[in-house]
Amino acid sequence: MTTPPNWDAIRDLSRRVIREGAPLLRTEDTRALLLRTADEVAIADAASALQSDDGALTLLHECSRRISEGSNRLMDALDRMYRHQDAGNYEDARQEMREVLSVEVVPYYREAAQGQLDDMADNP
């Protein structure tokens, strides 16, 4: 599995701007952070979003949403998967990961779910 992305900076920016109401300044560093994160969470055409303040804010919201929802989705599914495995029910455990893969767009989370599914291939 690839190294997990470091989303601390985007989480920090999101906290300051979205939760605390700080202005989103479109500096070169902020642009680079948003472009990199957009790529990591599979958002196309991020560069055009950065042409306006509203577009940049929308991009920040969407990056943050994909990171948090994808993480929550995967963690919840992993919890259920492990419970199914503990009960010896590998088909339902596999189904948990299939359901994540059916909706997840963030490549890192997709890779994690696929890895779990692959690891269960040898189980009944």
Image (cartoon, rainbow, N blue to C red):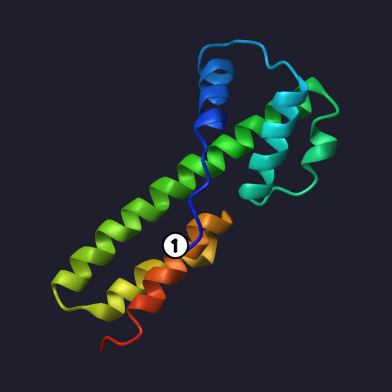
Q: Residue furthest front?
A: 3
44 over 49 or under it: above or below: below
Identify residue for label 1: 112
**In the displayed structure image, the side of residue 79 where residue 59 appears, left or right:** right
10 over 36 or under it: above or below: above
**In the displayed structure image, the side of residue 107 where residue 23 appears, left or right:** right
Give residue 37's quadrant in the image.
top right
For mark 1, give the secondary structure: helix
Q: Residue at x 35, y 75 (%)?
A: 94
Q: How many marks?
A: 1
Q: Residues within 10 Å of mark 1 (few under 14, many from 20)?
A: some
Quadrant location, the C terminus: bottom left
Give residue 90's quadrant in the image.
bottom left
- Specify the amino acid type for callout 1: Ala
Q: Position of residue 24 (x, y in %)?
A: 68, 17
Nearest the camera: 108 or 94? 108
Q: Residue at x 47, y 40 (%)?
A: 68
Q: Position of residue 22 (x, y in %)?
A: 60, 10
Q: Residue at x 34, y 52 (%)?
A: 75
Q: Residue furthest left?
A: 87
